Each structure stands twice: as structure tokens, then as C-alpha cells.
Image (spheres, rainbow, N blue to C red):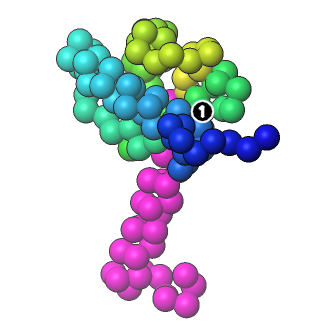
Amino acid sequence: MERSRGKTSQRTYPRSVRVNALLQEVLAEELERLSDRDERIGIRTITGVSCDPDLRHALVFLSSLDDEVAEALEEHRKSLQSAIAKQVRMKRVPQLKFMVDPAIIAGSRVDEAIKRVRDGGVPEQSL
């Protein structure tokens, strides 16, 4: 069966990418609102969201996350999930888990290694 190329739109990127971007947008807005009510959260940057294909779980990557912020986010997790349910039409709302973006951690390690080399602490050959 051939698809008609008339009025149907062609998707240029997969569904999972669209879902992740939508969740990131909704969560960023909700975290901004939440930070007004709970000062422990402060200003946080969501660097990405990775939702399971079955939509049961989603990892929310943040630029930084200390214990106090992690505790506050866990306390507000259900309200964040509720906000997703109200704003996004999905089969199910994923259970959220918050963590520091691994790319941020790796970037910090590289920065530290460069600083050590620049300061003469580690020979360049060992990198």
C-alpha cells in the first residue's frame, strides 16, 4: 500500500525525539514556576529528557543536582508528572527520575585534566 503524498506531513525525526523535547519544555516551565514556591530548587537547567519507548519512565538530566535539590525534586515529582498529564496528550505519563547530565560530568573531568596539564601537574603524555 503506497502512502499518498498529498496533505499528510512527513516526520523528519523520530517520535521519541519529539516526546523528549516536549517533556523537556513542559518540565522546564514547571520547574520555573516551582522555584518560586520552593527556594531549594533555585534556577535549574534541564539539559535533556530521555523517555523509555513504552513511556513508563523518563530520565530528566539537569546541569547540576545536589542532595537538597534532589530531595526537593523528589517531593514535587508527582506534581510535575501531573503537570505533564494536564499539558501533554500521552498514552501514559512517565515516572520521572532526576540526575546530573553525564555530559556535564564528563566535561568537568576534561576541564580539570586540562587545568592540571596547564598548571604543570600532569605530563601531557599521560592524557
Identify the residue under disc 1.
Answer: 51
Q: Around disc 1, counting alpha carbons within 10 Å, would you say few (fewer than 14), some (14 to 19), or many (20 or more)?
A: many
Q: Residue at x 46, y 18 (%)?
A: 88
Pick out the residue farthest to the right: 1
Q: On the rendered structure, is 114 left or right of 99?
A: left
Quick check: 119 above or below 10? Answer: below
Question: What kind of secondary structure does the magenta stretch mostly adopt?
Answer: helix
Q: Is residue 118 above or below residue 23?
A: below
Q: Quadrant of residue 59?
A: top right
- The image position of residue 106, as x and y in percent, is 50, 59
Amino acid type at mark 1: Cys
Pinpoint residue 125: horizontal percent, then vertical percent: 55, 90
Q: Residue at x 46, y 41 (%)?
A: 48
List x then y, in percent, for residue 85.
48, 11
Query: Does 8 appear in magenta?
Result: no
Q: Quadrant of residue 119?
A: bottom left
Give the position of the C terminus as an image quadrant: bottom right
Magenta highlight range: 98-127
Residue nearest the observer in this picture, 63 or 84: 84
> Looking at this view, is 97 or 111 the one in front?
97
Q: Is residue 95 visible?
A: no
* Residue at 23 percent of width and 12 percent of height: 37
Q: Secondary structure at mark 1?
A: strand
x, y (%) of residue 8?
A: 54, 37
Q: Nearer the viewer, residue 109 or 31?
A: 31
Task: Tell me, yes or no, whether the highlighted magenta stretch contains residue 112.
Answer: yes
At a point 49% along the width and 88% down the height, the residue shown is 123
Residue 82 in sight: yes
Q: Quadrant of residue 14?
A: top right
Q: Quick check: 92 above or below 53? A: above
The quadrant in which the N terminus is found is: top right
